[in-house]
Amino acid sequence: MEDVLDLYTLPYDPAYPQVCMDELSKQLIGETRVPLPPAPGHVARCDYEYVRLGVANLFIFFEPLGGWRHLTVTARRTKQDWALFMHEVLEQYYPEAKKVVVVMDNLNTHTPASFYEVFEPQRAKALAERLEIHYTPKHASWLNIAEIELSVLARQGLAHNIATIEELARQATAWQTQRNRQVGTVNWQFRTADARIKLKRLYPVQSSDSQLAAQGTSCDSLS
């Protein structure tokens, strides 16, 4: 936790851009009957029944200090999909960066080893070496700023039924374009000093010198 929080205090460096990465599953849902559009004196109406059409995945990377984000929609969320997405991030958006500093959760697909599922070993190693990964702790995904962006996306762009992966990609791209145009950088306020106060219960309890001395005496007497 403190590793990620300290990272957020660093200034912008184009040679080492900070990127937060996350992903979101979206249930594709179709209508069983054609919805009725609004008419004079009547609101739009749709049937309560629906049909499940599978699940799609959205990858996002968000640069908090640059204030912009990019989304990619995939049919799956495998190691290969993650590797191709991160290849896009490295080669298309940060080709000149020495290293891309990435904050993400420790899902088993989020590992440099995934590059070897897609690319030749030499290429996979070169891609892995351009990543500096900082994993969020378990049960602390809130430390990933990209999760905030996905929450906004879910409320603003994906709150209605979406039936196809093509429509999902269109909605995600439209939201991304508008969000990049209107939203600036993120001013992250929660610091390591705050964590040590507000999350004090999560830190180990340190024994005092007198307690340590008493423990030592007890051990000596037993021996």
Image: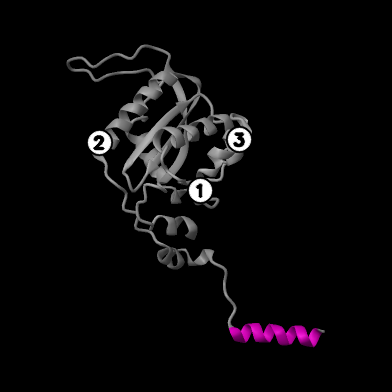
State the image quarter where residue 180 is shown: top left
Q: Are marks 2 and 3 in contact (CB under 8 Å)?
A: no
Q: Nearer the viewer, mark 2 or mark 3?
A: 3
What residue does disc 3 label?
Answer: 122
Looking at numbered disc 3 in the image, what kind of residue is underneath it?
Gln
Residue furthest out toward the top: 34
Task: Look at the image and say whether residue 219 sits in the magenta stretch.
Answer: yes
Q: Secondary structure at mark 1?
A: strand
Is residue 117 shown to the viewer in this render?
yes
Residue closer to the observer: 87 or 50: 87
**How far separated are the C-alphas under marks 2 and 1?**
28 Å
Looking at numbered disc 1 in the image, what kind of residue is underneath it?
Glu
Q: Are marks 3 and 1 in contact (CB under 8 Å)?
A: no
Disc 2 packing (10 Å; few <14; some 14–19; many ≥20): few
What residue does disc 1 label?
Answer: 132
Compared to residue 203, the image places residue 61 above or below, namely above
- Residue range of the region highlighted in magenta in the rendering: 209-222
Looking at numbered disc 2 in the image, what kind of residue is underneath it?
Arg
Q: Are marks 2 and 1 in contact (CB under 8 Å)?
A: no
Please report whichever mark, 2 or 1, sits nearer to the chain's N-terminal start.
1
Q: Is residue 4 left or right of residue 156?
A: right
What residue does disc 2 label?
Answer: 181
**How far separated are the C-alphas under marks 3 and 1?**
18 Å
Compared to residue 207, the image places residue 147 above or below, namely above
| Main secondary structure of the magenta stretch | helix
Q: Residue at x 34, y 30 (%)?
A: 157
Disc 1 packing (10 Å; few <14; some 14–19; many ≥20): some
How far from the left and from the top, in percent, is residue 167? 38, 20
Q: Quadrant of the C terminus?
A: bottom right
